[in-house]
Amino acid sequence: MTEFSEWFHNILEEAEIIDQRYPVKGMHVWMPHGFRIRKNTLKILKDILDRDHEEVLFPLLVPEDELAKESIHVKGFEDEVYWVTHGGLTRLQRKLALRPTSETVMYPMFALWVRSHSDLPMRFYQVVNTFRYETKHTRPLIRVREITTFKEAHTIHSSAAEAEEQVERAIEIYREFFDALGIPYLITKRPPWDKFPGSDYTMAFDTIMPDGKTLQIGTVHNLGQTFARTFDIKFENPDGEHEYVHQTCYGLSDRVIASVIAVHGDESGLCLPPEVASYHVVIVPVIFRGAEEEVLDACRGLMERLESAGFRAHLDDRDLRAGRKYYEWEMRGVPLRIEIGPRDLKNNSAVISRRDTGEKTTADLESIEDTLRELMDDILENIRKRAWERMNSMIREAETLEEAAEIIEEKRGIISFMWCGDEECGKDIEEKVRVDILGIQEGGTGTCINCGREAEHRAFLARTY
Amino acid sequence: MTEFSEWFHNILEEAEIIDQRYPVKGMHVWMPHGFRIRKNTLKILKDILDRDHEEVLFPLLVPEDELAKESIHVKGFEDEVYWVTHGGLTRLQRKLALRPTSETVMYPMFALWVRSHSDLPMRFYQVVNTFRYETKHTRPLIRVREITTFKEAHTIHSSAAEAEEQVERAIEIYREFFDALGIPYLITKRPPWDKFPGSDYTMAFDTIMPDGKTLQIGTVHNLGQTFARTFDIKFENPDGEHEYVHQTCYGLSDRVIASVIAVHGDESGLCLPPEVASYHVVIVPVIFRGAEEEVLDACRGLMERLESAGFRAHLDDRDLRAGRKYYEWEMRGVPLRIEIGPRDLKNNSAVISRRDTGEKTTADLESIEDTLRELMDDILENIRKRAWERMNSMIREAETLEEAAEIIEEKRGIISFMWCGDEECGKDIEEKVRVDILGIQEGGTGTCINCGREAEHRAFLARTY
């Protein structure tokens, strides 16, 4: 693969995912093809969340005083909040912030909604745009000023144990979601100095991009009772006493789409999980003079059959050379292509071509629905396996900090090592290797890579996006 | 019905549609039940649009200089645009407006997208939030500062005739949509002084609220070439010459949901078209001591059957009195309720109760799916018919301005009369009757209600929201 950053920029343009020419830095346009991929991805996510979450929609604008209420939280965002100061030519009495995330939007309302222990748990989510005045270099879908696809879930519980359990459930939800996209992930607990502002702790999903840098693609926060105290969210317990609730929140963003594109893509362009692709299958008639109508009729018939069987199918009957069509649909990541010519018709068969492996097989037209379904399952399994293998091959164990620095310098990827867990020691490691600690996993024994003390944490280092 | 305004305020709260207590004026929260109604309504709309429109998503923020480019257009909005002036503590070099509508967001990009006549027509739509700094009294879903559900379609054509035709198609689309919701409408051409800023002309859909005031629920604009000139959107025609494109746009908002609620609602609360309601049908077990398990099992079995047959069904097995449940589901507008008790089970039947008429029928459990489907169709037809009859009864012909003023004063509603079409005369009418001209329809003959000249337009007056 050519240099990743250039490849990514080009594929967003060529596959018409995002138009990067919008005249505000860090804000982009979802083009029709990109929008369909986004919609299909969101459908997978919503189908999972809708099992036990309620979808809601809260306002974009947060009054300054509400945003400022949770002081630790607001510190984490104040440098990057966009402020609305005027309505028409009138200066607003209270400045309004564009939500950077919605804790301060939702939680004053939660204080009104929660009454009794029998109301709990409550689980909400919304998919909205959020805003960060990024001063770093922006990059579509990865580091943007308008996050167009921010899925944030917020839950409310009557005990710490239940909130803890919800964190586990949220992790399971994200596992299921990323597995459905074939995206590999490393789940770690963020070091305390990198947790979500105002939370007790943060669990994070990172994946690895083709250039060896990691991308945070999902986070789950246990908020404890911090926000409950700030926003006075209380419930009446069975004994009639009022207690503060326990909360969690967890989020995903446009970065999920960035990772679907980057993790599976190759020199030919996009390679998408079937459920994400704009079409499951594209039918290309192979036309020779004299047999046009017969072939086209057969293609149209097949098209109808596939649609009524629930496939997202497309018949490409444009007057273009077949090769040009193959190139386009491969670039756009459509997982399966069916070619039908006069000879195929005679044999009542069709040639099916896989985007992920390039393999071609001849399939019986009678039972082609079954064949396509099997191939779709197989494609997801194959690209998922391939992506996990690549990610695993880029996680390397280091015994010394010198070794860690060397691997990062030469190969990037993720470095795994034992760490004592002490904050000062951790920051010392980050300084020495000049790379951030991604997070930790409990368990294992050994000695700390830096201070030599006994260590019961495994930690991970990586260059991050 | 009690005073409409109070009824509307209360039902939004009691049916948990919108929480009006968000601490910014004119901005509200979609609660879970309201969100489902909104989602179901949008699904109907998107299914229609997706036939020949591409869904896209453009940024929220418009640079000041882009917004200002089309001078007539910006004049129409400048008093009510929210301005972002700061990112973090930094003053932005260019102020950014929160989109009041997206012409100035999309059209600079259209100039990049349109190349040749073969690219045209293009038809896009997006569903987004837009912002207006309303200085008038705000009211949820009707006059808000954050329009949370703005569906805007924008089309591009190579000839004036094609744009004209698209206006007709857009009107057909909205007809189909409002018919699916059972909402009656009056379609008129807005008078020139009330057209969309920058357009050639505006066609509008108005419905009538229970208090006799009209509500604009949809508009279709022929933009001609005004924006094409401003944003330099050109295509190469078959002769190789560059021409400006012709454009249309058409929009709907949260007001659609307001009208579904207001037009069909009654003293018992919401009365929703089946496809809009959160559930098509609610099953309420009628339990007597000794038969609990048998009845509950039957209800669970029926629930599963209905879901697999594609119904949105809900089993209300809460430990509450049946009457309380009936009250709740009626208030929430669920169109059909199934009651099953021990006696019904013996007869292999169930009692079905209609929300719109209150009628109860006993149905055979074997074929209950068919019965439900028939009832759902009948309910939509019935509430649509009822709503059209009410609206038609509130459109009254006036022969003189005195008569018009009298009817408006006493009965509100819509006044229909002949008008010469002259702007000065029209404004004179508005001043005399102190009510705005809603719009005109071509055709008919007679003399102008005001100046007595020959008139070929029918015009309509009404108090509007």
Image: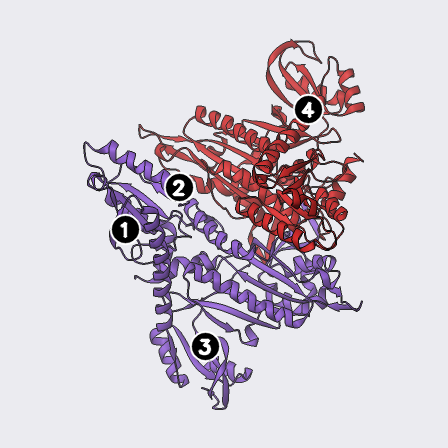
Chain colours: A red, B purple
Residue labelled with disc 2: B307
Residue B249 in which image quadrant: bottom right
Relative vertical location of residue A160 with respect to residue A1 in this rendering, above or below? above
How many numbered circles does the render carry? Answer: 4
**Residue positioned 55% across, 59% down in the render:** B132
Quadrant (top left/top right/bottom left/bottom right) for the N terminus of chain A: top right
Residue B455 placement (x, y as % from top left) = 50, 87
Mark 2 or 3, nearer chain start: 2
User: Label 2: chain?
Assistant: B
Mark 2 or 1, nearer chain start: 2
Element class at badge 3: strand
Label 1: few (<14), some (14–19) or many (≥20) C-alpha neighbours in 10 Å: many
Residue B88 visible in the shown view:
no
Q: Are marks 4 and 1 on the same chain?
A: no
**Residue positioned 25% across, 44% down in the render:** B349
Residue labelled with disc 4: A389
User: Label 1: chain?
Assistant: B
Q: Nearer the viewer, mark 3 or mark 4?
A: 4
The mark found on residue B353 in the picture is: 1
